[in-house]
Amino acid sequence: MAENTTEPTYHDVDVPSWRVPSGFTWLDFDDGRILGGAKLGNEVWFGWIAGSRSDRPFAFAQIVRLSTQNFTLIGSADVWDQNAAVGYPALAANSITEEVGVSYTFGRNDPSHAVGILTGTTVHETTIQGNPTNVDRWGDYLSIRQDFDDTGKAIPSFAATGYVVNQNDSALSHFVEFSRASRASSTDEP
C-alpha cells in the first residue's frame, strides 16, 4: 500500500491449500490465519499452521514466497518435523544478510521453542525444550526481528522471543539472539 493512498490494493495469488490442524491440544487455538510475514527485496513471505498431509505426518508451518513484482507464487519453505507438530511461525527479514528468519514451536505434548534461517541452506536450532506435560493452553506469542546494536544500527543477526511451559504448568519466556555465523544465545525469564 503506497503511503499516499487511503485504500490498499489487493492481489489474489494461488497458494498451496491448507486446513486447520487438529489432534494437538496446544494447537487448538489456531484458526488457519496467517501468523507471520516478512518482506525481503522483491519478495514477501507469509506463514501459517497447516494440518497434516501425506508427506507431512503432523501439523506444520507452511511458508510461501510471493513476488512483489508480478504477485505470483515463487515457492514454499515449509517447516515440518517427521515426529512432531510445528506451529505458530513468526517471520522477519534481515536487510544486512538478506535472510529470512523464523521463530516457532514444535512438539507433541511438550511444545519446545526453535529458531531458524529459511533462505539459502536452511538452519534450525532448538533453543529451549518443553517439559513433557499435557499442555492445555498455548498461543501464538512468538516474535522475531532483525537485531540492532546498542546504538540502534542494524546488525547481521536476529532477535526472537518464544516460551515453553515448565513442569509447574507455568510459562517460561525466552529471548534469543542468533545468526548463521553463531549459535543461538538466549535468556530465560520465569
Image (cartoon, rainbow, N blue to C red):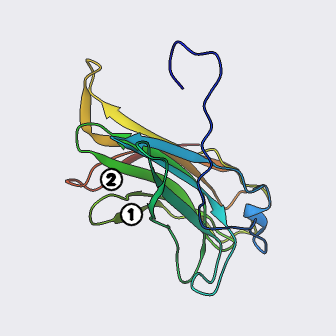
List the residue tagged with mark 1: 125
User: Above or below — where is 184 with respect to 84?
Assistant: above
User: Above or below — where is 150 with respect to 9?
Assistant: above
Between 129 and 92, the one nearer to me in the picture: 92
Q: Secondary structure at mark 2?
A: loop
Residue occupying image coordinates x 64% and y 68%: 110
The extreme front residue here reads 70
Q: Quadrant of the C terminus?
A: top right
> Can residue 28 be spotted in the picture?
yes
Residue 7 pos. (x, y %): 65, 22
Residue occupying image coordinates x 60% and y 60%: 14
Q: Earlier in the sequence, mark 2 or mark 1?
A: 1
User: Above or below — where is 156 with respect to 119?
Assistant: above
- In the image, 27: left or right of 74? right
Residue 180 pos. (x, y %): 24, 55
Between 182 and 189, the one nearer to me in the picture: 182
Q: Quadrant of residue 40?
A: top left
Q: Which mark is residue 184?
A: 2
